[in-house]
């Protein structure tokens, strides 16, 4: 019943939470920008919600999902064995192994570093996971063109982007990414660095999801920094 009510409210443009609003905006972007054969990447696949949308809007594309939490990766491999390449590793700016903080009772907050858990009582364990770069994995899987990348990695987004520099700079896919205080700052990552990655290194712009859909002007560096500091927006699109 809760899911039914949520779907009805979403259809009316009424959102219970900011995350629900972002989910709806993300789906609108996929519907508008993907074609049947678009190839997509999901960094931080969790339970596969975004993978389902990739399959829905690009049914003939070659999709790849990354998930370092072992039991989630195992479940994804079982559920998407015929439709998505699932990699049971994290993405970073290098290949090898890395310690990973698994938040057992709030897995969406898991990441390479501990972060602000918003006053939750968390059950943490440190595990060692395999890591790779997106550039390396796409070459390994012989995926030569990518239309869209979604990144939700609890603060490590700049590391992921650095490991995807060749892909982003060359193909300029849409990059939907989370970047917010309470996560990115635990990696000593500033919004200025993220902005410069897109602007200076890839010749791309950044917008909020809503402004992008409305075809409004992209963000200035100051706008992007202000959103980060205030927390009024934390999901963005590089384009």
Image (cartoon, rainbow, N blue to C red):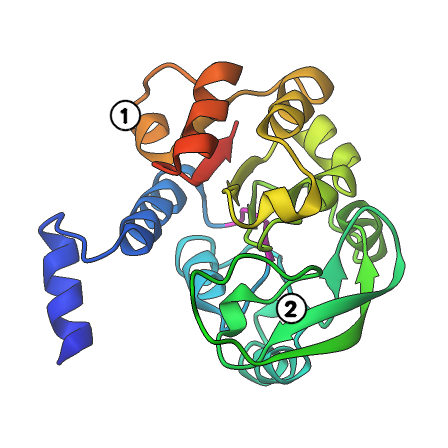
Label for residue 214?
Answer: 1
Q: Give the CA separation, mark 1 to mark 2.
A: 32 Å
Residue in the foreground of this view, choosing between 100 and 171: 100
Q: Position of residue 175 (x, y in %)?
A: 55, 38
Q: Position of residue 134 (x, y in %)?
A: 75, 49
In the image: residue 3, left or right of residue 170? left
For mark 2, does the 10 Å Cα neighbourhood hold few (<14), some (14 to 19), or many (20 or more) residues?
many
Question: For residue 159: magenta?
Answer: no
The residue shown at (52%, 41%) is 179
Measured along the vertical axis of the image, is residue 5 above or below residue 195? Answer: below
Q: Residue furthest right?
A: 96
Measured along the vertical axis of the image, is residue 41 above or below residue 180? Answer: below
In the image: residue 162, left or right of residue 239? right
Q: Which residue is mark 2?
A: 67
In the image: residue 183, left or right of residue 202? left
Mark 2: secondary structure = loop
Upstream in sequence: badge 1 or badge 2? 2
Tell me which segment is drawn in magenta: 37-43
Q: Position of residue 77 (x, y in %)?
A: 63, 80
Label for residue 113?
Answer: none
The residue shown at (64%, 84%) is 74
Mark 1: secondary structure = loop
In the image: residue 166, left or right of residue 123? right
In this orientation, does residue 219 appear?
Answer: no
Number of numbered discs present? Answer: 2
């Amino acid at each position: 019943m809760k899911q039914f009510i949520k779907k009805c409210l979403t259809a009316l443009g009424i959102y219970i939470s900011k995350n629900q609003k972002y989910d709806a905006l993300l789906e609108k972007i996929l519907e508008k920008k993907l074609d049947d054969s678009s190839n997509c990447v999901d960094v931080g696949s969790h339970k596969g919600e975004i993978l389902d949308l990739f399959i829905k809007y690009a049914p003939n594309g070659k999709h790849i999902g990354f998930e370092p939490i072992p039991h989630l990766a195992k479940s994804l491999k079982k559920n998407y064995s015929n439709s998505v390449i699932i990699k049971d590793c994290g993405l970073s700016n290098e290949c090898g192994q890395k310690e990973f903080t698994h938040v057992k009772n709030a897995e969406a907050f898991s990441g390479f570093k501990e972060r602000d858990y918003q006053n939750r009582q968390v059950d943490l364990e440190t595990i060692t996971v395999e890591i790779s770069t997106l550039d390396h994995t796409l070459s390994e899987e012989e995926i030569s063109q990518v239309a869209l990348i979604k990144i939700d990695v609890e603060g490590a987004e700049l590391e992921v982007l650095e490991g995807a520099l060749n892909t982003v700079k060359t193909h300029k896919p849409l990059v939907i990414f989370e970047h917010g205080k309470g996560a990115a700052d635990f990696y000593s990552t500033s919004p200025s660095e993220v902005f410069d990655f897109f602007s200076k290194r890839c010749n791309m712009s950044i917008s909020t999801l809503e402004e992008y859909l409305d075809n409004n002007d992209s963000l200035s560096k100051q706008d992007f920094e202000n959103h980060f500091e205030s927390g009024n927006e934390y999901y963005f699109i590089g384009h």
